[in-house]
């Protein structure tokens, strides 16, 4: 196996770990913050997509994922972005 193949395999494993972490985060929010979990599911219509969004680094979060912001106590910022995504910026 070449170095590139080993690295590609490693990256694939990291992506799988991130996906699992996103799903676990949605599950944890269902019990610790049901309102936020409801907003995530209303916005993304599935736990998998909500988990993907939680662990991605979307524009507007200064390079942090929503999950990282939640861990830093920035719930309102995450809720604000979710509301904008759900109802649109111009209603």
Image (cartoon, rainbow, N blue to C red):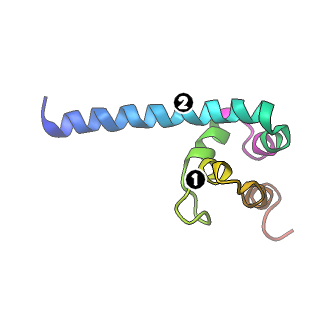
The span from disc 1 to disc 2 (Cα, nearest Å) is 15 Å
Q: For the view shown, which residue lies furthest in the bottom direction?
A: 90
Is 46 contained in the magenta span? Answer: yes
Is 70 contained in the magenta span? Answer: no
Q: Give the main secondary structure of the magenta stretch.
A: helix
Q: Is residue 67 left or right of residue 87?
A: left
Question: Could you tell me residue 8's position as x and y percent?
Answer: 27, 37
Q: For the view shown, which residue lies furthest in the left direction?
A: 2
The quarter in which the N terminus is drawn is top left
Give the mark nearest the N terminus, 1 or 2: 2
Helix, strand or loop at label 2? It is helix
Look at the numbered discs 1 and 2 and tell me whether their residues touch, using CB distance below 8 Å: no
Magenta span covers which residues?
39-47
Dot 1: few (<14), some (14–19), or many (≥20) neighbours within 10 Å? Answer: many
State the image quarter where residue 32 is shown: top right
Going 59% across and 42% down the picture, which residue do you hit?
Answer: 52
Residue 4 tag number: none
Residue 20 tag number: 2
Along the line of sight, which residue is nearer the eye, 68 or 60?
68
Question: Could you tell me residue 50's position as x and y percent?
Answer: 67, 41
The quarter in which the C terminus is drawn is bottom right
Dot 2: few (<14), some (14–19), or many (≥20) neighbours within 10 Å? Answer: some
Along the line of sight, which residue is nearer the eye, 20 or 49?
20
Question: Could you tell me residue 61's position as x and y percent?
Answer: 60, 63
State the image quarter where residue 47 is shown: top right
Q: For the view shown, which residue lies furthest in the front direction?
A: 72
Disc tally is: 2
Residue 65 tag number: 1
Looking at the picture, does residue 75 appear above or below residue 31? below
Q: Is residue 65 left or right of residue 70?
A: left
Question: Could you tell me residue 41's position as x and y percent?
Answer: 77, 39
């Amino acid at each position: 196996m070449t170095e590139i193949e080993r690295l590609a395999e490693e990256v694939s494993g990291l992506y799988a770990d991130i996906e699992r972490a996103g799903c676990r985060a949605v599950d944890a929010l269902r019990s610790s913050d049901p309102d936020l979990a409801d907003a995530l599911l209303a916005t993304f219509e599935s736990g998998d997509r909500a988990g993907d969004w939680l662990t991605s680094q979307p524009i507007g979060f200064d390079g942090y994922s929503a999950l990282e912001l939640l861990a830093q106590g920035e719930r309102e910022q995450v809720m604000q972005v979710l509301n904008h995504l759900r109802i649109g910026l111009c209603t």
